[in-house]
Amino acid sequence: MPDLLIELFSEEIPARMQTRAAADLQKLVTNGLVEAGLTYASAAAFSTPRRLTLTLEGMLDASPAVVEERKGPKADAPEKAIEGFLRGAGVTRDQLEERDTPKGKILFARINKPGRPAAEIIAEVLEQTIRNFPWPKSMRWGSGSLKWVRPLHSIVCVMSAEDGAQIVPLEVDGITSGDITFGHRFLAPDAIKVTGFEDYEAKLARANVVLRADARAETIWNDATNVAFASGMEVVEDAGLLAEVAGLVEWPVVLMGNIADDFLGLPAEVLQTSMKEHQKFFSVRNPKTGRIEKFITVANRTTADNGATILAGNEKVLSARLADAKFFWENDLRVAQSEDGMATWVKALENVTFHNKLGTQAELINRMAALARELAPMVGADADEAEAAARVAKADLSSEMVYEFPELQGLMGRYYAAAAGMSDAVAAAAQEHYAPLGPSDDVPTAPVSVAVALAEKIDKLTGFWAIDEKPTGSKDPFALRRAALGVIRILVENDLSLSVSASAHSSINRIAGQKLLRAVIGEMDRLVELSEEFGIEVETLAHLVEAADKATAPGIDVEEEPNFKREIDRKFSPRKVIDLLAFLHDRLKVYLKDQGIRHDIIDACIAMEGNDDLTLLVKRARALSETLKTDDGENLIQGFKRANNILTQAEEADGVEYSYGADVKFSETDEERALFKALDDAEAVITPAMEKQDFTTAMSAMATLRAPVDAFFDAVQVNSDNGTVRRNRLNLLSRIRTICTSVADLTKVDG
């Protein structure tokens, strides 16, 4: 069984595209071969800056012959219909077989398809792959029509077996396949003849090309850490940068350079970001001082002077880049430390649109400040400090440093807030209010940071819900799913009890208030018309316009105006809050599913009162999940459902509700009396536990009912001939239902 080697050799492929391109090459070729009947044992794809490589082992040398049966028209169909079927199937009339079926006599054709040589199939599939390759961006060059990410120079396509190797012949826009590749562009540019994958990889290595990206990355990291360690330094880890740099070189050579003393005073994050984004350098830190003092660059070749010339050039370019960063830093510090401080930047945000339906960044800041103040007592923060933090949290968006390096937003806010003399809590909130940005990021824990982070995310969610810009399918342009998960994680991981519905309603009212102010500002000549439109008295509107320059909502108590309140409820009805809460519950299911908690368990808890307190909801779900993992808990569900089914059927048949009046004196068996006692004992534990929101204790007490419930159903016939006894037993089942559903809606639990 032969092996196959394919290489597509081109000018440098962008590093960000290489891994995906190698996977696409493997997928397209292997899918095409398998569809044509050519199977294989294993496949692997590789990439370097100048080549995509695919190797297949244990491939068939030809596709198998197959017999295809095709159903045709009825035997008495019009002749033209039969002729059309013959042409499509490629058979003659005498090759058709007539069969009796429930629908009458039908014509069938048996089509013999002979096997095809592997080389013929490979050539077809590879040509189609090259011509239709899904590059994110591609180009044409010369006079040909072929599109490729960069000019394609050569194609290696070789089948090898024990009796030797053969070239699979094909041609794509004048590029003919062969068995010739090329080594390193500078160190070994000569042509290399290959006979198979092992030969190919070994010869490339001798020609200064490391084929495997993971091997290049490992070499870079090992050499970088060793050279840094030799100088008493350490390399700052950056997996993304390491993967990118491994895609920039075929023969990695690690060099360490110095950062000029003028720039060592810049924040470490500024140095790291500038070197990474502009130069693809690794930062090297002095573990004694914590400062970034050197850099690692990765060259694509060895040189006679051991990289001295390369380093000199890189240091020169880096100094120019860092000079810009230093200029931005010093200018921003002057603004932050001025008399107006960060208020200058906040003022500038009045001219920056957050969203055309939600106003400016300055209006967003006002809403955040008001909501952070509301949330502060609930999260243990000082209200004044939370509001102050929210007002400067996004100020750094106007700074020169963040304009140059947007990824530093928040972080620079922390530096500038500290430089402006603000408290550590306010400075920390400027950085942490964006967190968490991903499912593995840490959540803020400082009370002020928590208040501002929640305010930012709740405002975003309610704002886009208010204007009906919700995520649809896989589309989520405003990252609302991430914001929802952030709210959940901040509340749950900080063990905070909060009514999300109340906060969302307050936020939506505030958004509506700002919308009203925007409508009336500058429209004094239309006050009577606007008064009728909004249902607010002219005097009130005039007051709002007059006060708008001093404080936008929430500074103005527009919500206290009864007519305006009705207008808000008309345009932004509670339905939006309910819909948003359902969205949060859906994200909560994803969050808890990753922790091993089933959807039906979460649904059973969501059905309970107070489901907008996400922390309590999670505690309830975790307690129920743990209870149902025990034998008593699992079997109690069966007993509860049996009791509920019998009770529901009886209530429907009798037209009454059996919800009270069970009395132990009407018991006829020991099992009945034991169940009465068990329910009394469980209720005595569950009721105070639920008042304390101690779900674990409540559900453990509920699980103790398993044995007496099982014994009751084994020994007792509920629908007794004695009407009094029957009613008493049905009321006893009602007690089971009431006690169990006081903990969670067990009707929604599977099983």
Image: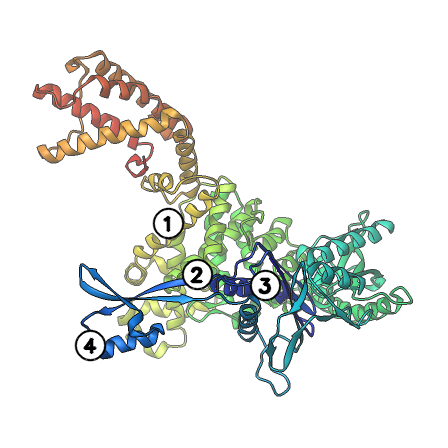
Say few, some or many: other residues with alpha carbon within 10 Å of mark 2 (under 14 / 14 to 19 / 20 or more). Answer: few
The answer to whether marks 1 and 4 mark residues whose Cβ atoms lie closer than 8 Å is no
Residue at mark 1 to residue at mark 4: CA–CA distance? 70 Å
Query: On the image, numbered disc 1 is attached to which residue?
Result: 501
Whichever of labels 4 and 3 marks the residue nearer the N terminus, that label is 3
Mark 4 or 2: in front is 4
Whichever of labels 2 and 3 marks the residue nearer the N terminus, that label is 3
State the SS at label 3.
Answer: helix
The answer to whether marks 4 and 3 mark residues whose Cβ atoms lie closer than 8 Å is no
Residue 710: image location, x then y, percent: 28, 21
Residue 63: image location, x then y, percent: 50, 63
Q: In which quarter of the image is residue 300?
A: bottom right
Say few, some or many: other residues with alpha carbon within 10 Å of mark 3 (under 14 / 14 to 19 / 20 or more). Answer: some
Mark 2 or 3: in front is 3
Residue at mark 4 to residue at mark 3: CA–CA distance? 53 Å
Whichever of labels 2 and 1 marks the residue nearer the N terminus, that label is 2
Specify whether 705 is left or right of 417: left
Whichever of labels 4 and 2 marks the residue nearer the N terminus, that label is 4
Q: What residue type is labelled 1?
A: Ser
Task: Count the labels in the image.
Answer: 4
Furthest residue toward front: 94
Mark 1 or 3: in front is 3
Furthest residue toward top: 670
Query: On the image, numbered disc 3 is attached to which residue?
Result: 20
Q: What residue type is labelled 4?
A: Pro
Q: Residue 158 carries which label?
A: none
Say few, some or many: other residues with alpha carbon within 10 Å of mark 4 (under 14 / 14 to 19 / 20 or more). Answer: few
Q: Which amino acid does label 2 sit on?
A: Ser
Query: On the image, numbered disc 4 is attached to which residue?
Result: 78
Q: Nearer the viewer, residue 133 or 689?
A: 133
